[in-house]
Every structure is written in structure tokens, then in C-alpha cells.
Image (tube, rainbow, N blue to C red):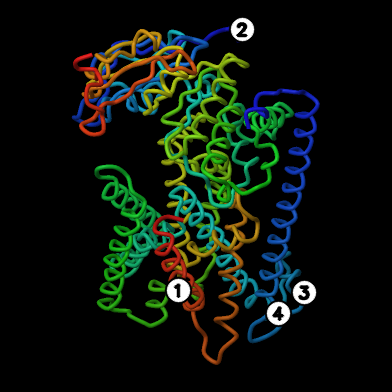
Amino acid sequence: MTHAHQLTADAVTLAYGDRTVVTGLDLAIAPGKITVIVGANGCGKSTLLRALARLLAPKEGQVTLDGLSLQQQPSKKIARTLGLLPQRPIAPEGIAVADLVGRGRHPHQRMLARWSARDYEAVADALAATGIADLADRSVDELSGGQQQRVWIAMALAQETDILLLDEPTTFLDVAHQIEVLDLLTDLNRDRGTTIVMVLHDLNLAARYADELVAMHDGRVHAIGDPDAVITEELVRDVFGLESRVIEDPLTGKPLVLPSGRHHVRAGVPTGTNG
Amino acid sequence: MSTTTSTSTAPANAALTATLLAGRRIRARRRTALTTGLVAAVVIVFVVSLMVGNTFYGLDKIARVILGETVPGASFTVGELRLPRASLGLLTGLCFGIAGVTFQTMLRNPLASPDIIGISSGASAAAVIGLVVFSLSETAVSFLALGAALVTAGAIYLLANRRGFAGTRLILIGIGVAAMLDSTVSYVLSRAASWDLQMAMQWLTGSLNGATWASVTPVLIACVVLIPMLLLHDRQLAVLRLGDDSASALGVHVQRTRIVLIVGAVALLAFATAASGPVAFVAFMAGPIAARIVGPGASLVLPAGLIGALLVMVADLVGQFAFENRYPVGVITGVLGAPYLVYLLIRSNRSGGSI
């Protein structure tokens, strides 16, 4: 990327009606990095992502892209820089993969203009990068969950944004497909320099794939930084209310959280509380 | 799969680009051919409905009447009876088809057609009150119907929107509202001094029997203004099908687009309903039939309009000439549409939700 875009939340308070979910939160997304947001259910992580994607207007404070408030910029202009893969996107019945991926070109197209050569190239690149070129003519309904997730990521790629936000992109996928999707996003980050911000449930996958980990608790940022520094037994206790042991992942050297729970832990083995 | 990712080898992608381009061209050509075919069918049915009746007139006489010459007998029968009737059928069909498919696409559910969810009933109730109680002119009735349809749409939207928006709730509330407004129509008709079967049929199921140039004009103006406006929003409508979040992320101003589409579709529907009554199930059937013909993923707005026009015109011909008695157009479309509604309800029940 020649110019890195800066996405920032300045003292944002986010609420659904009267129910405040996030209070006075500051966050600067590291350009060109993979940022993963983790936290317990209801801590406001998806809400924060919605605000970063300008699906939710802050009650107080503002989200800015390159210094300008998201609410003050034209939707289409933002959509050329900032992409989003929502948790449950909807595929129109019977739509072909190439057609759906092509919808990602919308922010680059003018009202009545035909498809440009660039549009076709972008769709072809997106299909190739996600490894679904051979599925281009298939109907999206017929594909497996993992394949469908690739199609949605391809659509976001065709949008050609420098920043991509993803809300739990691995939910509903089995472990092999989870790894596949996260590897694909890492490729995207390394090859194209795309800034990635995603919400993940699995702490261990978050620790493995994040350059920058944001742990949220009660609508605030509890800790932020390198996963090695952020993920500790104390943090898991504070954020999730869970006793655990954190060891080094023998495969990656990253922290690996072993939750203790009330059953199955062998007698005499130190858990987070006493060890 | 990890080996296939991110290898942006230019030649491979160039080939893929060419394939995509070719595929899209083929589909575009096929769509153009199908749309042209539909337009041709509409023109043929239109001309046939000018020719047939108690007296048959050949193409030459029809052409002369349309060109403004005076042809004994034909000038009145074709120029003042058949031509307004066929024009009204064509235009109201276009309106119903386009309004229906816009709602169905926007709400992602074939049951969410304006004639199922009570908006037609709102227009119909206002029109019948305007005519029977206040004896208003055609134009005034059109605007009264428009106002009532917008209010009905707004009320249903607000009722369904409480604590989050749910498509199924909107449909159920709409069906309730439709029942209420339909009974209003029946009540007003039963109290009307000049009550007759003809009029009752028009406002209960839709009819072209009262077609005059005065009733055609407001619908024609609505079509000329609103259809291009809806066609201009075609691409946004296509993106809205991916869900509000995705559409918003793709740069569509969801709220604004939705308001434009709702107002446009409701206005088309209201003007058509004020002229012909709520022709049963045309708005509901046109979109799904068009989807069968042009295939998934393509824009349905124009094809659905043409199918709507065909449905109304063919059903009117059938109603007039196929049986011993003459039936209003709405009876014929109702007979076609009701089984389809049952089929959809069974299917949506089986799949457990929206389609």
C-alpha cells in the first residue's frame, strides 16, 4: 500500500436506544496490521466493529477515517476504502458466485455505467486469491459453509479496500475451515498490505493470528498490544471471569490459553489461581 | 487450499477475466432477448385486444383509428372503448408488476407484495370512499389513494419495526391490516346509494370495465415519472438484497434508498389501484414469474412490469370472451393467484422462514 489509511475511534460512546454498550472508547487501528478484538459475550466488541464500519452512529465522540468523521463523508467514498464482512450476510436465492462477488464492485461503479475492464479484473483477482475460480458459475446456495465464507471474502476483496472489517468470520465453520479462512486473511494482509480488523471468539486463534490484540471488557478497552504481552492468566480472569493456565504454543511460540474449569483438571496440577 | 491462495499470476487471472467477461456478455444478451420477447408479447396482446370484441376489426382499421382517421363504427368502439381499456390494462399491469417486485426484492420475501400486506387495500379503501362518499374526480381519487397507500405503508412499517425489524412480522401485520381495510371497502359499498355489482367487483377484485381516457391519464403520468426513477435505483436494489449491513458497507445509503423505493412503488400501486381497483394478485405473481423467466441474479424490475401487463391484459381478454358470462379481470387473476399463494405458504413453512 502506498498510503496507509488511518481508522480511529475518538472517545466514542455507543448505544442501542437507551442501552449504552460502549463508553468513551479510544482506539487507533494500526495500519497494515491484523487487529483482533476479543472479549466476553456482550462486552461491546461487535458493537465497536459496527461503529468502525459506520453501521452505527456514535452517541458521543466520533469514528474518523483519515481525520474525517465517517458520518460526514459520502457512503460510496468510504466504501472504496473501508470494507465489511458482516456476521450473517444474505445470499440472494440462486445467485452465481461470480455475480455475488461482482456486487463488491458497487462502490466503484457509477449509476448507469457498464462494467469496466477494471471491474472484471478485480472480480477475477478476488476469485483467484480466495481459490474459488472454479466455482465462478456455481450457485452460492449449493456451496459448503467454508466455500460460502470464501465467496463473501472474495466479494469484500473485489471491493478493493485498504481496510477490511470482519465480524466473527469463523463462526459456523469447522476447525479446518477456520484455519483456512484465517490463513487466507493473513495472505491478504501480507501480500496486499490490507489492514484487517476482526472480532474472534477463540482466544487461541486470536493470539495466533493477531499482530495487535484488543481485549474488551464492559464496553472499554481492557488491554491492547502484542498478544504475547496481552494474554496472561490475569487478563483471562479479568475479561472472561475464567481461571486458566497460559503456556507457550509449541507450534507458534504464541500464548496458548488452557481453561481450567471445575472438572477434569488432574489433582496437583497448578492452574491459574495458584500456579 | 493454502497452495491456491494469493498467487496473483497475471496470465491465469487474465484468462479468468476473459471468461467472466464472456459469461456476462452471454447473460446480458440472453436478458435482452428475453426482455425484447416480453415487449413483443405485450404489443401483440395489446393489438389483439383492440381487434376482438362483439365486432372484429382488422389491423388496417385499427391503424387508421390510432392515426386519428374517422372510421365509421371503429372510431367509437376501438378509439373510445377498446383503446382506453387496453391501455389501462397495460399500464396498471406495469405498475402492479413493478411495485410488487420492488417490495418483494427489498423485503427479500415473495409474500411481502403490496397486495398481500395491505397497501393495495389502503389505496382501494380510499378510492372507494372518495368515489362513493365524496363523489370526487378521477384525479382527486388518485391522489387520495396515494395518500392512503403511503399512510398504510408507513403504519405497517412502524408497527413491524418495533424492537427491531422482522420481515415475517411485517407480513403478518400487513395481512391483518389488509383484512381490516378490505372490510372497510365492503362496508362502504354496502352503504352506497348507487350500489351495483359492477362497481363492487371493481373495488373488491379489480376491473377494467370503467376504463376511460380520464382514468388512463393519471396512471400514464405516474408510469412516465416513477418507472424511470425506480429503474435508476436498480443497482442499489440489487445490493440491498445482500442485507442492510452488506449494502451499507458497499456504499448504499440504505435508509434513503429504501424510502425512495417504497414511495415510488407505493405511488405506482396507488395510481393503478385508483384507476382499476386492486387487480387481485398481479403484484404478487409478476415478480416470481419474471424470476423464473430471466433467472436468478438478474434485475427483475422491468421484466416483472411486462409480465404484470401481460397478466392483466390476457386475464381481461379471458374474462371478457372465454366464458358465457363476462367476468372482471380480477376474478381471473384471483383464480390464478390464490393457488400460487397457497403453494408459497406451504413452501415457506417447510423451509421455515423467508425465501
Circle 4: residue type:
Pro
Q: Is residue B323 above or below residue A262?
A: below
Secondary structure beneath dot 2 equals loop
User: For the residues marked 1 and 3, what is the alpha-carbon distance in whole angstroms?
Assistant: 36 Å
Circle 3: residue type:
Leu
What residue would you read off at disc 2? Answer: A2
Q: Is residue B143 above or below residue A170?
A: below
Chain containing the residue with disc 3: B
Residue situated in front as seen by the camera: B332 or A116:
A116
The mark closer to the camera, 4 or 2, is 2
State the residue lying farthest toward the bottom: B324
Secondary structure beneath dot 1 equals helix
Task: Give the residue at x 32% y 27%.
Answer: A47
Chain containing the residue with disc 1: B
Is mark 1 in CB contact (under 8 Å) with mark 3? no
Chain containing the residue with disc 4: B
User: For the residues marked 2 and 1, what is the alpha-carbon distance in whole angstroms?
Assistant: 60 Å
**Residue A152, x across and y down, in percent:** 54, 35
What residue would you read off at disc 4? Answer: B72
Which of the 4 image quarters holds residue A69?
top left
Q: In the rendered image, is residue A22 in sight?
A: no
Q: Residues within 10 Å of mark 3 (few under 14, many from 20)?
A: few
Residue situated in front as seen by the camera: B74 or A79:
A79
What residue would you read off at disc 3? Answer: B59
What residue would you read off at disc 1? Answer: B338
Secondary structure beneath dot 3 equals helix
The mark closer to the camera, 2 or 1, is 2
Task: Give the residue at x 59% y 20%.
Answer: A187
Task: Give the residue at x 73% y 43%.
Answer: B24
Chain containing the residue with disc 2: A
Circle 1: residue type:
Ala
Which of the 4 image quarters holds residue A262?
top left
